[in-house]
Amino acid sequence: MEFPYTRNRILRQSAAIREMVRETHLHASDFIVPLFIIEGSSQREEIASMPGYYRMTLDLIEAEVKELWQMGLKSVLLFVKVPDSLKDNAGTEALNDDGLMQRAIRVIRQTVPDMLVMTDVALDPYSSYGHDGIVVDGKIINDATAEVLGEMAASHARVGAQFVAPSDMMDGRIAMIRESLEAERFHNVGIMAYSAKYASCCYGPFRDALDSAPGFGDKKTYQMDPANGREAEREALMDVNEGADIIMVKPAMMYLDIIRRLRTKMTHPISAYQVSGEYAMIKAAGEKGWLDEEAAMMESVLSIKRAGADLIASYFAKTIASKL
Ligand code: PBG
């Protein structure tokens, strides 16, 4: 064959042809918007390590979710900042049907009834130790924690949560949550399981946002070792066998291979969480003028979707939706 009969650049020569052969497209409905909620009224606090991202009081959240819905964003993932005085080693406040999380669910369901409300299910924001589970003799104990998580999920369902998202990495918690939801006949509440959640350096800004950094040690006895790939398949299989509806990989950008790996092995929808540290890196490089922030943002989420994610939880969701 004579050089060059195949010219790959033909399909790149104009915006029109590039758009027509593009394999991956972003839609506002791909995104899940994380929201940080605080007690009080009319307060909006910027998170120092997450420039342009805020903790908000519930009254401001109302306006925020209306705006998000108008932009085509269909789902929010709720996190609350709990005052120290309400933290303990049992997750007591997590089960309070009038706690901040539960009030937030009610308010958002009333404000935008079609918005999909997903809630974080884990004890760390409620824990006096800053761990995702109950601590006994310096260890995070599994089964008692999973039981509380089941009750926590039911408490969220009672006030209207449509999806619960356990982010704790205890073994067997999906089964406990499903059982607890079934016991109260919440047959339509979904579980988005953080199946492959790694012990990553990228959660720092989130822990600043919620004041939830571990008081001792780290989370390596429950979150996954970043060196492991096969183990992600085992975690995801276990979660779907226990009744998970959506499986999640977290963080996203450093774990694109895990997203792809699960995409080829599993049939369930996969969501990927572009976490606080991933947001912070792009923002910081943008602020310094070292990267084009908007281009970096777009390329990052496009890559996450190309790797195989159906859904993307991202702090860039609103900015991206405004550009689509
Ligand atoms: C805690 C939880 C964390 C995140 C979501 N849920 C932090 C952690 O595991 O320490 C991180 C999200 C982010 O960094 O954006 N259960």
Image: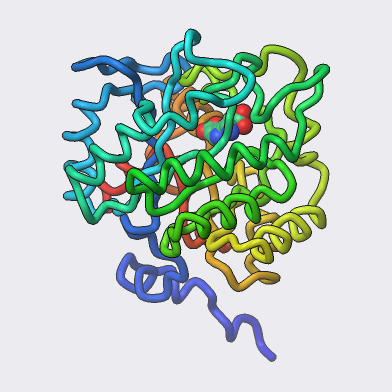
Q: Position of residue 5 (x, y in %)?
A: 58, 86
- Vertical position of residue 65 compared to residue 216: above or below: below
The foreground one among 76 and 87 is 87
The foreground one among 8 and 67 is 67
Residue 104 visible? The answer is yes
Q: Position of residue 232 (x, y in %)?
A: 75, 54
- Vertical position of residue 205 compared to residue 179: above or below: above
The residue at the point 38 percent across, 27 percent down is 99
The foreground one among 78 and 243 is 243
Report the side of 163 relative to 117 (left or right). Answer: right
Q: Position of residue 301 (x, y in %)?
A: 47, 49
Question: Where does ligand 1 appear, by image quarter?
Answer: top right
Q: Quadrant of residue 238?
A: bottom right
Report the side of 109 relative to 286 (left or right). Answer: left
Count of residue discs? 0
Q: Residue furthest front?
A: 183
